[in-house]
């Protein structure tokens, strides 16, 4: 399999069991080795006491993009540490896109940056995730 085929097959295997992302209405828009793009429309059920999108939902979208990007090599990878900076308010009805890109991957550790934008391309949040490879694969390994 090519690296792209491995990324696609690993993403499909993860997506099949990812109830959280699916039930929040996320879509997996792009997958490539070390990269992933997911999007989601903010619903009224995701609003906070200020009438904006609750930050936890923005974090969850970014975390899902992080997960798909760092699991794109057929290794089981988990988040070790992550942080988010909220830059602009997000409104009900906004379509958010989280674009994850690999910054560094050495040994069992990786660093990924995830940019979250709205439907107008406005940069609303920035997430950084540190990953850790653990035992297991998403796909069978020959040998």
Image (spheres, rainbow, N blue to C red):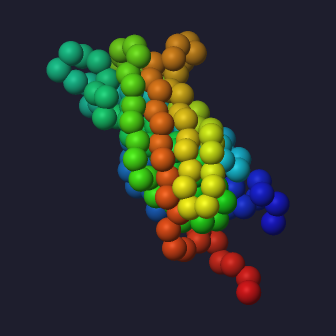
Name the residue furthest right: 2
Could you say where residue 31 lies in the image, as x and y percent from the top left? 67, 46
42 left or right of 9 in image: left
Q: Residue at x 71, y 47 (%)?
A: 32
55 up-or-down from 14: above or below: above
How many badges with numbers are in the image? 0
Quadrant of the rendering where the N terminus is positioned: bottom right
Name the residue furthest left: 49
In terms of depth relative to the viewer, which is nearer, 35 or 39? 35
Could you say where residue 83 lies in the image, as x and y percent from the top left? 39, 36
In terms of depth relative to the viewer, which is nearer, 57 or 133? 133
Q: Residue at x 58, y 38 (%)?
A: 100
28 up-or-down from 51: above or below: below
113 up-or-down from 134: above or below: above
Quadrant of the rendering where the C terminus is positioned: bottom right
Could you say where residue 14 lies in the image, as x and y percent from the top left? 53, 60
The answer to which image quadrant residue 25 occupies is top left
Q: Residue at x 69, y 78 (%)?
A: 141
Q: Residue at x 65, y 77 (%)?
A: 140
- Residue 25 visible? The answer is no
134 up-or-down from 22: above or below: below
In terms of depth relative to the viewer, which is nearer, 11 or 134? 134
């Amino acid at each position: 399999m090519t690296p792209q085929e491995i990324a696609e097959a690993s993403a499909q295997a993860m997506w099949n069991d990812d109830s959280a992302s699916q039930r929040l209405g996320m879509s997996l828009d792009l997958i490539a080795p070390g990269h992933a793009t997911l999007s989601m429309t903010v619903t009224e059920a995701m609003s906070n006491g200020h009438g904006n999108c609750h930050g936890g939902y923005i974090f969850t979208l970014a975390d899902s993009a992080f997960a798909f990007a760092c699991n794109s090599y057929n290794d089981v990878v988990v988040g070790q540490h992550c942080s988010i900076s909220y830059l602009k308010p997000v409104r009900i009805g906004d379509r958010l896109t989280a674009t994850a890109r690999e910054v560094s991957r050495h040994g069992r550790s990786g660093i990924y940056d995830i940019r979250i934008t709205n439907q107008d391309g406005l940069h609303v949040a920035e997430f950084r995730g540190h990953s850790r490879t653990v035992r297991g694969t998403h796909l069978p390994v020959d040998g």
